Image: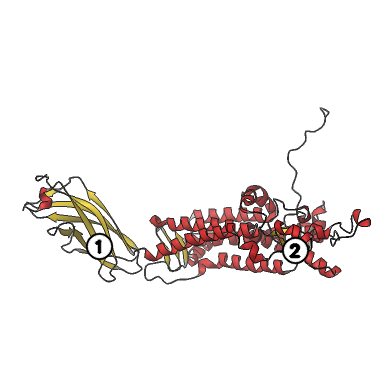
Amino acid sequence: MSSTDPAPSLYVAREPIFPKRVSGKFRTLKWYIMGITLGIYYLLPWIRWDRGADLPDQAVLLDLAGRRFYFFWIQIWPHEFYFVAGLLIMAGLGLFLFTSALGRVWCGYACPQTVWTDLFILVERWVEGDRNARLRLHRQKKWDLRKARLNLTKWFLWLLIGLATGGAWVFYFADAPTLARDLVTFSAHPAAYSTIAILTATTFVFGGFAREQICNYACPWPRIQAAMMDPDTLVVGYRKWRGEPRKHSELAKTEPQGDCIDCMACVNVCPAGIDIRDGQQLECITCALCIDACDNIMDKIGKPRGLIDYMALTDEEAERNGAAPRSVIKHVLRPRVLMYSGMWAAVGFALVFALFIRSDVELTVAPVRSPTFITLSDGSIRNTYDVRLRNKDLHPQTFRISVKGHPKFRVQIEGTPYESVDVPADTTVLKRVYIIAPNGSDPVAARSTDVRIWVEALGGGERAYKDTSFTGKGDGS
């Protein structure tokens, strides 16, 4: 290479992809999934759920200030984060399950990047026209009034979608109607405006310009998916033994012609811009739009559908010999898929079980050891404990505190002669509790006595306890 030649670039500039509109069962399925997922995301914060007085009535709420997660009738406290961890584990196992059965079906249908990119492409097609019109506009180097108008209209609609996306996200963290009013009157917290701005910008860039590059370079899943798949996994593929040689190729002049007419319909509809006839590729998100495009062409030329279809590598040899492929059920119900299904179900069962057996009352007990005990005027020994009561019920509760360990122990709550305490709904209270042993009793003489502090809801019968110890003089040790 001459010293005057420019250095070769290590990177290739992105070629914009303009997918063509296609109709078919998989495209219809994607429209339904897009409508359902976007509907859930945008509308869920506005659903109301009555939990009683002084509690939020938003069905789904991540209350960071109150340190609660509300999901309809379920309430998750900070110390119950294992429920969130369990849901994340289930999400991961679910991803493994679907990938092992149907390839990157999550990426092709329900991934947020795919859903919003589909929505942005829909807007782009509505403003600029279908693939050929968008290609002409892109290749038009000179900016005139029409090109500027179309691009500005498209970008403005993208920004509105991005703004709605960021706005919907912050509504999950505060009461939606109240926050909406504060946002409009510019009285909301700056964190809300900054979050909306960041999500608006990322949605605008990722869905409008980056698109398949997020899947190819930013997302790790394309590089992990191979570990989840095997030759029995159903993926979108091209039946080369049926389609080749293509009618437009040189081989077609001397050999029997295949069903593929090299119309490029499968490439033109692909949001990743790949040719599925080249085999499985990292960029393929298994959206199956190429199946719809190819089936439409097969219908027009009078050939059977399925030249591009969901298929498994293990069926290739049988199909080449004219045999029918195995059923979908046989491909799905295999050891790997069943193992992931069992693990997913086990985690889900454990979470549901833990949710139903958890008590509505919890307590923590911390002995106050400075001093370790106090001798009262009548010779009794008193130990002090900080008892934290948590009422997770949606109604106020009255709890009675008692102690087990010696029949002569008695309990006294600081500031009251009673052994009960009122705890409001969904609230934690801290009480100083005294355990008193009368003079001459065994706990007074012993150095340490095991005790169990009980709390019981007087109305509902919910009970909880904590084990601790009572410190005496140690005279009898």
Q: Earlier in the sequence, mark 2 or mark 1?
A: 2
Q: Which mark is residue 455?
A: 1
Task: Locate the N terminus and report the quarter of the image it occupies.
Answer: top right
Work out whether residue 239 can be spotted.
yes
Q: Which residue is mark 2?
A: 291
Quick one: 439 or 123, which is closer to the camera? 439
Q: Position of residue 318 (x, y in %)?
A: 75, 60
Residue 99: image quadrant is: bottom right
Q: Residue 189 versus residue 69: which sits nearer the camera? A: 69
Q: Is residue 422 left or right of residue 80?
A: left
The quadrant the C terminus occupies is: top left
Q: Residue at x 29, y 67 (%)?
A: 462
Quadrant for residue 158, please give it. bottom right
Residue shown at the point (9%, 55%) measured from the top left: 438
Seen from the viewer's position, the closer of residues 154 and 26 is 26
Q: Is residue 60 left or right of residue 294?
A: left
User: Is 4 located above or below residue 82 in the figure?
Assistant: above
Instruction: Return the x and y of residue 223 as percentages of the image width and height.
Output: 64, 48
